[in-house]
Image (cartoon, rainbow, N blue to C red):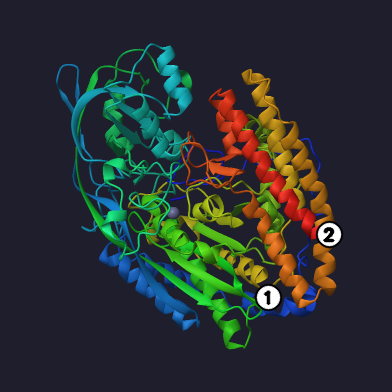
Amino acid sequence: MTMPSRVPVLFVSFLLPAIAFIGAQSGTSAAASGPSSTFGYKDFAVEQAHTDQTFLAVPDAQLAGEELKILTAEPHIAASPEDLKTAQYVASKFKEAGLETTIVPYKAWLNLPISVKVEAWDADGHLLMTGPVPEHVDAKEPFQDDPRVTPAFNGSSPSADITAEVVYANYCRPEDYDKLSEMGVDVKGKIVLCRYGGNFRGVKVYIAQQRQAAGVLIYSDPADDGYYRGDMYPNGPWRPATAVQRGSVQYLFKYPGDALTPGIASRPDLPASKLLKPEDAANMPKIPSEPLSWHDASPILEHLGGPDAPREWQGALPFTYHIGPGVKVHMALKMDYQYRTLWDVIGTVAGAEFPDEWVVAGNHRDAWVYGAVDPNSGTAAMLEAVHGIGTLLKSGWKPKRRIVICSWDGEEEGLIGSTEWAEDNTTHLAHAVAYFNTDVGVSGPNFEASAVPSLKEFVRDVTKDVPSPKGGTVYDQWKKAQAEQAHRRGFNGVEEHAARGNAHVENDVTVGDLGSGSDFTPFIQHLGVPSTDIGSEGPYGVYHSVFDDYAWFVMNADPTFVYEQEMARVFGLEVLHMADADVLPYDYETYGKEISAYLDAAQKKAEETGLTSLDFTAAKAAAEKFTQLAEQVRDKQQSAAASGSPQQLATLNAQLRDVEEDFLSAPGLPHRPWFKHTIYAPGEYTGYAAVVIPGVNEAIDAKDLSRAQAQMIVLTGALNKAVGTLESITK
Ligand SMILES: [Zn+2]
C-alpha cells in the first residue's frame, strides 16, 4: 500500500505515508550542524569507505529488471499459491547471498471476493450502470486479461446486499461530511459516494459508519490521478477509464495486522481460544464498501440531482456534480472470509560485535494484482541490496550488528506480515537499533524519504554517498528537486504544514514524518524502533489496479532500471552504516527541536480552539531540556567513537537506543492502545498522514480539555523519561 504520496496531491493509496510538505520550515533555525557521514565512526575512511565501495559496485540495474519481471509475472495476492511462489523465489535469492533464511508463516482473517456487483438506477427506474466492468484498455496490454486477476474489492469489507439512495461526499474527509450536514444533507441510511484522495480509504468508511451510512463507494476521479493530470495508460502513466484502485479499508488507525489477534502474533499454532470473534474486532468495518473506476462511477454522478456540489468538490468529469438524491444503487458483495496462511521471508546475518543489536530492513512482497511498482519495485531493489551484502560476506566481511532482511506478506490487507512478526519478536526488537522500510521503491526518478527525526540526517548522509543517474549524488538531485518544487508552489507548504500542526526545523532537504500506510508502523509506533521509509517517485496513476504491471513499469517508471539500482544502493547503505557504526548515529538534537515545534503548534491550536487553560509549560520545558542535553550527548557520541573502549561503546549505544523507547507509553493512545508512541501515530481521521504528539493533538481537535490535560501528563512523563536517559549519558 503506501501511497504515492509525498507529493501534495490528493491522491491515494492504501497506506500512504506522510506527505512531506516541501519547503516547510518553521521559524526556528536549526540543525545545520547535523552529523556528517562520518558521524558514529572512529575513522570512517579506514573502517567504512572500503566496505561501501565494494557494496556500491554490486547492485545491478539489469538484474533488478530481471528480478522485477520474475516477481510480477503472475498476480500474487496475499495467501495465494502465486504469493507462496514469490516467497520461495525471494528465499532462494537470500540464501544465494549467504543469509540464514526462513519462511515464517502467520495466519490472518482475510476476505477474497466470490462476487461483487454494483447497479444503479435513476429516479425513473432506468438502469444507469452495472459493474464493475473488467479493467481493460484497447491495446495489446499483455497482463490485463489474466483470469487470476481478482475483481475490484476492498480488503476488510463485509458481505452485503443493500439498496439505497446515493449521496456524493467529495473526499469523505471529516470536513466534507460536516459540509453536508451544514447543507442539511444526512448520510444516514444512504450509500456515500467518495472520491479517492485526501485521506486513507479506511477513514472514509470509518466516518461513514459513525454517521450511520448504509455503505460506501469509492471511485478514482480523473482530476486526481487520471486524464486531468496527463495522458492515460497506455499513452502515459495516468489512470485509464476502467482502472480501479483496490485496497484495504481496515481501521488500521485502531490497530493493524491480523484483525483477530491485536497485540499477539497469529502463529499457526496459536490456540483458537486466543482469537477474537470477527464481530468483536475493532479494526473491521461494519458497513460494506466497494471501489469503482470512473467509468463505472460516472453514470451515477452524472444523474445525481439535488443541490450543486460545492465548486471545490467538482472533479474532472464533463458535467456538474450534484449531491443527490436521484440515483439508487444496489451493492451485492459476497466475500469469502477465511483464516488464511501468509508467508514472511526472513534472512539474517549474525553480528560480530553487538550480536543482540538488530538492524532490520524490509519491504512487502504481496500485491493486489501484479504490483510492479507497489511493492515489487521495492523488492527488486531489496534483492539487489542483498546481492551486495552477499558479495561483502563472500569477501570475509562481518557486520558488527545483526542484520535482518524481511520480505513481508499481507501488507496490502493491513500490514499483516510485519505486524505479526513484530509482535512475535518483541523481546529481540527491544534491542533493534533501526528499521528501514521501502514499499513503493520506484515509480519514477524523484527520491523521497520519511524518518523519525533522529534518523533524518542519517538518511541525508547516506544519499550523499550514492550517485544519481541524473548526475551528482542522490542528495544533490533530491535537494534540487525540492527547491524547484518549493519555488513553483510559492512555499505554500509552510501553511499546509502549520495547519497540520507539524513543523519541521531542518533548513536542509525536508524528510517527512512517518504516518502509516506501510510496514514501519509496528516498528516505530508499537515498539519504538527508530525507522525510515524511502522511495523514488514519479507520475503514477495505476496504483492498486491491474495496470500496475511490468509493461507499465518499463514504459513509465524506470525503463533501464537505473533508479532500481539507485534504490538498492541507498537501502543497502542504510543497513550497512547502521550495522557497522561504532556509535549509533542518532541525532537527538533535531528530535528535541522538532518536538518543541510540535508543542508550539499544538499550543497555538489549543488557543484558537478555546482550550486556553491547557498548560504546556512542563512539556515545553522537558523538550527544551531534551535539546540542551542532546547537544552534550552529540559531543559524547563523537568522543566515544574516537576513543571509547568496547565496554564504553556498548553501554553508550544501549543508552542511546533507550531514548526512543522512552517515548512509548504503556497504556497507548486513548481508544487505540496498540499505538504506544507519544510523538507519532497515524491520524484517526487521516489514516496515512502522521499526527504528531497524537494524544494531545487529537484531544485538542476533539475540544476535550480533560483528555488533553491527561494526555499532556502522559507526554510530559515520556519526555522526562527520555531527558533522564540523555542525562545519564552525559554523566
Ligand atoms: Zn505497498
Label 2: state its secondary structure. loop
| Disc with the residue nearer the chain's start (1 vs 2) | 1
Q: Which residue is drawn at 64% across and 71% down?
A: 579
Q: Quadrant of the C terminus?
A: bottom right
Q: In this view, does 35 lie above or below 594?
A: below
Within the image, what quadrant is residue 711 found in? top right
Badge 1 amino acid: Asp
Within the image, what quadrant is residue 36 found in? bottom right
Q: Where is residue 193 in the image (x, y as percent from the top left)?
A: 33, 28
Q: Give me the disc on residue 253.
A: none
CA gap, disc 1 to disc 2? 34 Å
Q: Position of residue 534 (x, y in %)?
A: 57, 56
Q: In this orientation, which residue lies closer to the viewer: 142 or 130?
A: 130
Q: Residue at x 39, y 55 (%)?
A: 416
- Mark 1 Cβ and ligand 1 under 8 Å apart: no
Q: Residue at x 51, y 70 (%)?
A: 405
Picture quarter with ligand 1: bottom left
Q: Position of residue 441 (x, y in %)?
A: 51, 59
Q: From this viewpoint, is residue 417 visible?
A: yes
Q: In this view, does 720 lie above or below 438?
A: above
Q: In this view, does 61 lie above or below 207?
A: below
Badge 2 amino acid: Lys
**Crowding at label 2, few (<14), some or many (≥20) Cα neighbours within 10 Å?**
few
Q: In this orientation, which residue lies closer to the viewer: 582 or 411?
A: 582
Residue hosting label 2: 731
Q: From this viewpoint, is residue 505 visible?
A: no
Within the image, what quadrant is residue 167 found in? top left
Q: Give me the disc on residue 52.
A: 1
Label 1: state its secondary structure. helix
**Crowding at label 1, few (<14), some or many (≥20) Cα neighbours within 10 Å?**
some
Q: Is residue 168 left or right of residue 626?
A: left
